[in-house]
């Protein structure tokens, strides 16, 4: 890490969450809250969107979070505010990420609001909503605090010399899905991550949280394959309030390709492998796809139309 892991040692020695709290963080019963299925138009849009995120500072983000009414008078926020204050006073983004790992309503409300940016779950509307809101001046009162937090984290992880380190390897997240969900996700389909999403280097942890789904749902193990240097996730080793969880944080707007769907496991799990796409791979694949189309100009125009609004 760019900063010493000892910064957070006093907060996290031998700490552990209850099973239910762990399940809330590492499991989801709604795949629609996690991902948006997309095509190549969405890929182009995402690349442009990330480039144009606002240049708000850590101070801007912290001030916005502290000013929101929905997080005030909440005892679970006490430790979060301490982390935010340290991030602001030391201008250290690792304290912002640490605040996210604290067991509180902060991460729950953050992700719920990010997921609800587009209630229709339509990719164009989702990207347009995030773009329109985040592209405004950081003093604009109409820009909600989750977009400040998202913007500063995405900018931070993409900065040269960032103390936020990405993870290379395999990381796991347990979900429960319906047969309809499964039918939508085909090999080679592309998805965009909507929220911050907790995964673990520990396969056994993710498997435990996918057990005993409700009637009509099936346990699924999502395997995120980060086999190249990337800026799609943050390795929380040395930062997390709960280091024993071996958490890897998947970031909003990360793009993955479904590379494998295995329904033959004896334990009953459906395994879905998702391969991370780097910016370079995205650009190369998008250009290749555009040239293979009969009317590639339509792709460019349709993307530009709503990004320029």
Image: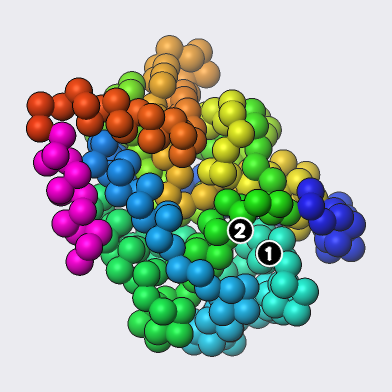
User: Residue 93 shows which numbered tag?
Assistant: 1
Residue range of the region highlighted in magenta in the rendering: 296-309
Residue drawn at x 45%, y 85% as measured from the top left: 139
Q: Main secondary structure of the magenta part?
A: helix
**Vertical relation: 27 (above or below) 81:** above
Where is residue 182 shown, x and y percent of the image? 31, 29
Crowding at dot 1, Cα within 10 Å, few <14 / some 14-19 / many 20+, comes out as many
Q: Which residue in the protein does label 2 denote?
A: 156
**Residue nearest the observer in this picture, 20 or 81:** 81
Q: Is residue 167 left or right of residue 133?
A: right
Whether 73 is among the magenta residues is: no
Rendering quarter of residue 281: top left
**Residue nearest the observer in this picture, 217 or 72:** 72
Q: Is residue 118 left or right of residue 259?
A: left
Where is residue 87 shown, x and y percent of the image? 71, 72
Residue drawn at x 76%, y 46% as measured from the top left: 237
Whether residue 291 is visible, yes or no, is yes
**Residue nearest the observer in this picture, 233 or 270:** 233
């Amino acid at each position: 890490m760019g900063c010493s892991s000892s910064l957070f040692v006093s907060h996290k020695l031998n700490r552990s969450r209850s099973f239910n709290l762990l399940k809330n963080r590492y499991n989801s019963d709604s795949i629609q809250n996690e991902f948006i299925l997309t095509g190549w138009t969405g890929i182009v849009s995402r690349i442009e969107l990330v480039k144009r995120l606002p240049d708000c500072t850590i101070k801007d983000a912290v001030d916005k979070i502290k000013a929101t009414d929905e997080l005030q008078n909440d005892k679970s926020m006490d430790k979060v505010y301490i982390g935010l204050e340290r991030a602001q006073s030391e201008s250290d983004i690792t304290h912002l990420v640490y605040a996210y790992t604290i067991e509180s309503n902060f991460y729950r409300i953050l992700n719920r609001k990010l997921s609800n940016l587009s209630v229709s779950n339509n990719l164009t509307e989702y990207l347009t909503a995030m773009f329109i809101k985040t592209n405004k001046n950081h003093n604009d009162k109409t820009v909600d605090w989750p977009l400040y937090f998202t913007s500063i984290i995405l900018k931070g992880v993409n900065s040269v010399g960032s103390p936020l380190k990405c993870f290379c390897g395999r990381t796991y997240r347990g979900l429960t899905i319906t047969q309809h969900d499964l039918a939508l996700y085909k090999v080679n389909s592309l998805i965009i991550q909507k929220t911050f999403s907790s995964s673990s280097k520990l396969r056994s942890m993710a498997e435990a949280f996918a057990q005993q789904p409700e009637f009509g749902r099936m346990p699924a193990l999502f395997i995120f394959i980060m086999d190249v240097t990337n800026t799609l996730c943050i390795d929380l080793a040395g930062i997390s309030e709960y280091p024993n969880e071996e958490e890897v944080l998947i970031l909003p707007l990360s793009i993955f390709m479904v590379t494998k769907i295995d329904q033959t496991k004896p334990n009953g799990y459906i395994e879905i492998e998702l391969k991370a796409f780097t910016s370079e791979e995205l650009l190369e694949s998008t250009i290749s796809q555009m040239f293979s189309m009969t009317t590639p100009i339509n792709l460019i125009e349709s993307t530009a139309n709503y990004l320029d609004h």
